[in-house]
Image (cartoon, rainbow, N blue to C red):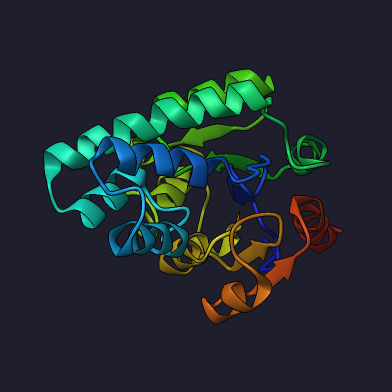
């Protein structure tokens, strides 16, 4: 077996394969308002900074950490999920240009594809339905499907196990946040790439330890396919 072959691509959704257009931040504003955070002032500003710093991580974890109270965290999480779904459907969910074709090209070449998210299973399913992507990937995972969300390795390793991949050095991870990079590195993936279509910039992604930074998922797919030639 080639030591260069990637057999599994684990791809984030919002900001990586799905255009976000600031919807996470908008839904977050609704959520922290519901949890009683003042609309202006230092508490709100600290909350806004926190959501940007932890972009890509499990949203319930974020609210638990930010608010320090389980009831408020659950309230905020419910408000976030509802607001994000409503905003996404109202705006019209769209893929990153070329994402569907890139995913298809990887699968046709024998690379299995898993789509992961920091959202709940219900929100992920709503996005997949809105995109018409119910069958686009070999596997879709939310944090609740794996145990813990990003930055832990659980979703990447769950994908590896469920899709019967032989080793972590046959896995490539792509995401738009430092949390995605941390997840891939913790899982031992050989390629842990950042994409410039989402929340964090090249400097942030490289500082987090990205092995590659690519303009989009299209370029990521080209990288993996080139290794199989």
For image coordinates 71% across by 55% down, the residue present is 197
Which residue does the image show at 28% across and 37% down from the upper left?
76
Label count reads 0
- Residue 195 visible in rendering: yes
Indicate the quadrant where residue 105 lies: top right
Query: Vertical placement of 74 versus 183: above or below?
Result: above
Indicate the position of residue 90 as horizontal and vertical percent values: 62, 21
Left or right: where does residue 2 sit relative to residue 69? Answer: right
**x%, y% of residue 147?**
28, 44
Q: Nearer the viewer, residue 204 or 228?
A: 204
Image coords of residue 8 (percent x, y): 61, 49
Q: Quadrant of the N terminus?
A: bottom right
Q: Give the quarter of the image for residue 94.
A: top right
Q: Residue at x 28, y 60 (%)?
A: 43
Dividing the picture into quarters, in which one does residue 92 lie? top right
Residue 182 at x, y percent in the picture = 45, 67
Residue at image location 21% in from the left, 49% down from the top: 64
Of residues 75 and 137, the one nearer the viewer is 75
Position of the C terminus, as image quadrant, is bottom right
100 horizontally vs 19: left or right: right
24 displayed left or right of 158:
right
* Depth check, front residue: 27 or 18: 27
Above or below: residue 70 compared with residue 91: below
**Residue 134 visible in the displayed image:** no
């Amino acid at each position: 077996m080639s030591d260069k072959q990637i057999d599994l691509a684990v791809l984030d959704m919002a900001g990586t394969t799905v255009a976000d257009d600031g919807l996470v931040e908008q839904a977050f504003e609704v959520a922290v308002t519901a949890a009683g955070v003042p609309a202006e002032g230092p508490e709100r500003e600290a909350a806004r900074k926190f959501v940007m710093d932890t972009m890509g991580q499990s949203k319930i974890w974020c609210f638990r950490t930010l608010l320090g109270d389980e009831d408020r965290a659950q309230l905020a999480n419910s408000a976030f999920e509802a607001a994000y779904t409503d905003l996404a459907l109202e705006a019209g969910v769209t893929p990153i240009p070329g994402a569907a074709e890139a995913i298809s090209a990887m699968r046709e070449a024998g690379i299995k594809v898993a789509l992961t998210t920091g959202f709940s299973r219900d929100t992920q399913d709503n996005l997949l339905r809105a995109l018409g992507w119910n069958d686009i990937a070999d596997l879709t995972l939310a944090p609740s499907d794996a145990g813990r969300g990003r930055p832990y390795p659980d979703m990447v390793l769950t994908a590896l196990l469920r899709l019967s991949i032989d080793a972590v050095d046959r896995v490539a991870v792509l995401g738009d946040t430092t949390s995605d990079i941390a997840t891939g590195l913790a899982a031992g993936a050989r390629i842990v790439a950042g994409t410039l279509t989402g929340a964090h910039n090249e400097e942030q992604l490289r500082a987090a330890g990205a092995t590659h930074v690519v303009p989009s998922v299209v370029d990521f797919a080209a990288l993996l396919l080139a290794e199989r030639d």
